[in-house]
Amino acid sequence: MRSGTALIAMLGLAWLAACASGGSGPAGRRDVITYEQIQNVNVSTAMEVIERLRPEYVRGRGRTSFDGPDTQLPVVYVDGVRAGGVDALRNISAHDVREIRYVNATDATTRYGTGHTGGVIEVRIRS
């Protein structure tokens, strides 16, 4: 009987640790900034949203080749259309944004093709 109680306690602790490490909903995900999160920060552009909530999105990913640039930054897509580099985020009103998502380089290459070694920042605009 005692080992059953210990097992239940260990499973409970494992479940709590899993929930605390990221959660299952969008609020716990590091790759997504939701509309609700955007509304809770007092900023005017998508770049400011990212700088405030997920600055790691716009940091370089390190050197990707010996003869290429030292770091690779993400490419920005707005509603599936390439908008340019991270500076394009300065031209997007935070008020218009529904969601911002970071896509790593591997997944970005699968979705958008080559040339995304720094990943992709997908911006979804409210309609």
Image (tube, helix red, strand yellow):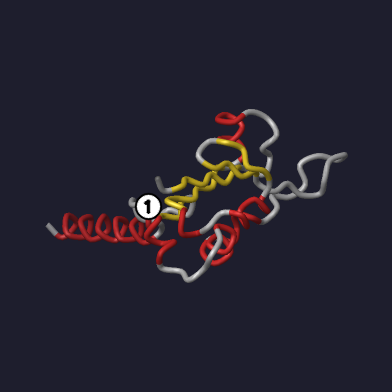
Q: Is residue 90 left or right of residue 27?
A: right
Check the image and report above or below for 104 versus 15: above
Local crowd size for mark 1, using a 10 Å CA cut-off: few (<14), some (14–19), many (≥20): few
Image x and y of residue 35, in percent: 40, 56
Q: Nearer the viewer, residue 51 or 39?
A: 39
At x 73%, y 46%, the residue is: 72
Classify mark 1: helix, strand or loop.
helix
Q: Position of residue 3 (x, y in %)?
A: 19, 56
Q: Is residue 80 left or right of residue 72?
A: left
Residue 92 in which image quadrant = bottom right
Q: Quadrant of the C terminus?
A: top left
Q: Is residue 53 left or right of residue 26?
A: right
Looking at the picture, how far across and down is residue 55, in whole percent?
59, 61
User: Which residue occupies 54% across, 47% down?
Assistant: 102
Q: As shown in the figure, which amino acid type bears the numbered disc 1?
A: Pro
- List the single residue furthest toward the left: 1
51 or 10, which is in the foreground?
A: 51
The one nearer the camera, 50 or 42, is 42
- Which residue in the protein does label 1 denote? 26
Q: Residue furthest bottom?
A: 42
> Residue at left 70%, top 53%?
60
Residue 52 coordinates in the image, percent (x, y): 54, 67
Q: Nearer the viewer, residue 127 or 123?
A: 127
